[in-house]
Amino acid sequence: MVPIVRIVSVALLSLVLPAGSASAECAWVLWIQSDGSLFEGTMYSTVSAWSTKAECERTLAEKFAADVKSWGAKYRVTVDEVSGAPRLFATSKAKADLIVVARYSCLPDTVDPRGPKGK
């Protein structure tokens, strides 16, 4: 009877342990936070979600470079990569009016940069 108990115990543990470790994993979400005269207040948008932080950061770098190029066609673009997260500043080419500041970040899917939701 002992061998059957061991077999059942091992079988149950094999079902429980992977579920416990899988719940500890999370997705990584690429967020863009935008402020400026093009928006009323702060706007948050998600670009994509990835299973690893490295994949998210690779996509962030690609998206940031593409946005610098596309925004640079219409506006004067300044880049800040020292602030902890890449930021793009777009100003009018005719005058120094700030049009948009976009901040790019990869966050775990458990973190919402908009803050806690009220009830």
Image: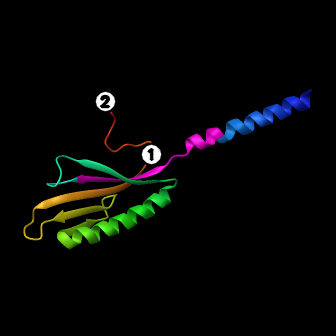
The secondary element bearing badge 1 is classed as: loop
User: Is residue 33 left or right of 16 when viewed as pictured?
Assistant: left
* Amino acid carrying mark 2 in the image: Gly
Question: Where is residue 61 shown, x and y percent of the image?
Answer: 39, 65
Seen in the picture, residue 32 relative to 14 is either above or below; the reply is below
Residue carrying label 1: 109
Q: How many marks?
A: 2
Task: Using residue 15 as the reference point, say whether residue 69 is left or right of it.
Answer: left
Q: What residue is rendered at 18% in x and 70% in y?
A: 74
Residue name at image x 26 percent, y 63 percent? 88
Residue 34 percent across, percent down from the top left? 25, 53
Identify the residue at the far left of this view: 95
Colouring chosen for the image of the structure: rainbow
Residue type, mark 1 in image: Asp
Q: Quadrant of the C terminus?
A: top left
Quadrant where the N terminus sits is top right
- Tell me which corner region of the image, top left, top right, bottom left or bottom right, holds residue 113: top left
Decide which of tag 1 and tag 2 comes sooner along the chain: 1
Q: Furthest residue to the right?
A: 1
Q: Which mark is residue 118?
A: 2
Alpha carbon distance from label 1 to label 2: 18 Å
Q: Residue at x 44, y 64 (%)?
A: 58
Rendered position, 4 above or below 40: above
The quarter holding residue 99 reads bottom left
Q: Which residues are magenta?
A: 19-34
Kindly state the secondary structure of the residue where label 2 is placed: loop
Residue 27 magenta: yes
> Is 92 placed left or right of 22 in the picture?
left
Instruction: Please check the rendered image and state whether residue 45 is part of the magenta-colored stretch, yes or no.
Output: no
Determine crowd level at label 2: few under 14, some 14-19, many 20+ residues with C-alpha closer than 10 A: few
Neighbour tally class for label 1: few under 14, some 14-19, many 20 plus, Cα within 10 Å? some
